Amino acid sequence: MSNFDFSDFTKTSIDSIGAKASPRVKEVMPILLRKLHEFLVEADVTHEEMMAAFDLLVKAGQVSDDKRNEILLIFDILGVESLVDALDQTRPARKGGKTTEASPSAILGPFYRYGVPEQPNGTTIIRQDEPDAPYTHLYGTIYDGDGKPLPNAVVDIWHDAPDGLYDAQTPEKPEYHCRGRFRTDENGRYDTVCLRPTPYPIPYDHQAGQLLTMMDRHPYRPAHIHYWIEADGHRTLVSQIFDRESDYLTDDAVFAVKDKLIVDFKPIPKDYVPPKGLEGKMKYELEQDFRLERV
Ligand code: MBD
Ligand code: FE
């Protein structure tokens, strides 16, 4: 075995792919096998290390459910979701087509929730009072592929509470706290009250945290607000915006920050009339537009 032929071994495993595999599988799996085997050989991985890695993945699977996706979190801190986002965003240009006119995208992360009920424009997503929190008037226009305002677009927004936690992490708080879904009006506008978000550590109590510790990395993300915007005839845009004054803009634990997504919160104008019950609480405003791309 001292003269084991590593590349011949990899070729054998690639050649084992059958004729009836789909074209995409035939394209992807040889690359995966080649790079995976190359990694094992170059790193000279031991059986013990391999078992530790599998154990970590098994445990990550066991703590995952519909509210907590530890596997996604692991691949987020390894840069996988951000890299795939960059591939998606640049694919048309790389394939010789024209560059997208859509606003920049950013990764989804583990805290999106399906089926959030729609609420009227001008209502807040802060569903329990957050004393002294930086209440923010967040509004803007969604544009279509021609740059014209787009009515009837669905805008999902979510961010962390002042304690740095998302709604799914705090079942004792009202459902959908700091999360809401809106529909743009006839002028393509959405309008809500949220909070200026807080930098926060991604959940590090399980395997993603174990990996961060192992690599001597911190778990923090800069303050951000998530968007998921969809409209008929347009490519769904998943994005995030980042507070220019936040820490961690240059060392986001999941590598999602893009310059064009960094925004400036402004003091709330004196003449702004807040939704009932929020009088005296408003501190900032942020006008945030997005442009979608036709499919
Ligand atoms: C988050 O809040 C997040 O937005 C991402 C992308 C990854 C982990 C936690
Ligand atoms: Fe997030």
Image (cartoon, rainbow, N blue to C red):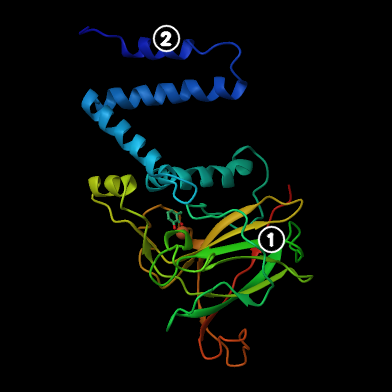
The span from disc 2 to disc 1 (Cα, nearest Å) is 50 Å
| 257 displayed left or right of 194 | left
The amino acid on which the numbered mark 2 sits, given as a three-letter code, is Thr
Out of 204 and 234, give the one closest to the viewer.
204
**Disc 2, disc 1: CB below 8 Å?**
no
Q: Nearer the viewer, mark 2 or mark 1?
A: 1
* Residue 199 position (above or below residue 89): below
Where does the image place residue 29, in percent across and percent down from the top left? 49, 22
* Residue 294 position (above or below residue 25): below
Q: Secondary structure at mark 2?
A: helix
| 144 displayed left or right of 200 | right
Out of 101 and 242, give the one closest to the viewer.
242
* Residue 41 position (above or below residue 208): above
In which image quadrant can residue 200 be found? Answer: bottom left
The amino acid on which the numbered mark 1 sits, given as a three-letter code, is Val
In which image quadrant can residue 252 be found? Answer: bottom left
Q: Which mark is residue 154?
A: 1
Where does the image place residue 206, in percent across and percent down from the top left? 31, 48
Q: Of label 2 and label 1, which has the lower sequence position?
A: 2
Where does the image place residue 111, in percent across and percent down from the top left? 49, 55
Estimate how packed mark 1 is, as few (under 14), some (14 to 19) or many (20 or more) residues with alpha carbons within 10 Å: some
Estimate how packed mark 2 is, as few (under 14), some (14 to 19) or many (20 or more) residues with alpha carbons within 10 Å: few
Where does the image place residue 228, in percent across and percent down from the top left? 60, 57
Out of 259 and 33, give the one closest to the viewer.
33
Residue name at image x 35 percent, y 35 percent: 58
Q: Which mark is residue 59?
A: none
Q: Which mark is residue 12?
A: 2
Residue name at image x 43 percent, y 63 percent: 170
* Image quarter (top left, top right, bottom left or bottom right) of the N terminus: top left
| 293 displayed left or right of 157 | right
